Image (tube, helix red, strand yellow):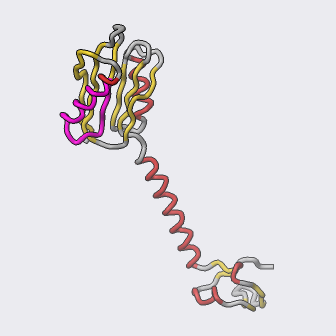
Amino acid sequence: MITKIQVKSRTHLKKRGEFTSHRSGEKLKCGVSTIITDNNRMKMKYITLCLFTFLLAGNLLKAQTSVYVCSTNGAYGYCYGNNSVSNCAYNKCIEHGGKSPYSVLSTSTKGFGAIAVGRKSDGGQAVGAAAGYKSLADAESRAKQECMNQGGDNVYIADSFSDK
């Protein structure tokens, strides 16, 4: 019993009935579902290409910039432009003395970024972050505003960067 028949043209896909085997010469009965054609192979290649493109796009949509801040002492860490910005920013926060970092910013947009630092009324450090802006002035202004929203006074820009 032969379950796979190779045919040379697409027109055979529409036919039902008897086919003659090229190898044995015996007559076989089959339906459309048992025929594998070059057209079906092209469809499979197209589907494979679409899946590959989808997976690649998923990797490209990962965060471009990430900022972590420690909730107990205000230490911060940030990274941009690499394959694992979230892990990198977390580890940099730990390196700078952070004990329990949490994410305050994650964006997939390239552009200018800034980190602003200020003092809270209880003496703790407030941190504001911005990234993905078209100008450095806009990024710094947003970072300062974010720091003030965290209760920071005497706010200043501690770091700025461009990821273009």
Location of residue 129 by image quarter: top left
Please tell me which residue lies in front, 1 or 121: 121
Position in image of residue 38 (x %, y %): 57, 78
Please tell me which residue lies in front, 91 or 145: 145
Residue at the (33%, 38%) spot, across then down? 81
Tell me if 125 is positioned left or right of 9 in this view.
Answer: left
Please tell me which residue lies in front, 34 or 26: 34
Above or below, 53 against 34 in this view is above
Q: Quadrant of the C terminus?
A: top left
Picture mark count: 0
Residue at the (67%, 80%) spot, across then down? 35
Above or below, 59 against 118 in this view is below
Tell me if 120 is positioned left or right of 25 in this view.
Answer: left
Residue at the (28%, 26%) spot, across then down? 115
Residue at the (28%, 19%) spot, across then down? 117
Q: Quadrant of the N terminus?
A: bottom right
Above or below, 43 against 94 in this view is below
Magenta stretch: helix, strand or loop mostly = helix
Position in image of residue 109 (x %, y %): 33, 43
Q: Which residues are magenta?
A: 128-147
Position in image of residue 163 (x %, y %): 27, 38
Location of residue 7 by image quarter: bottom right
Residue reaching furthest to the top: 123
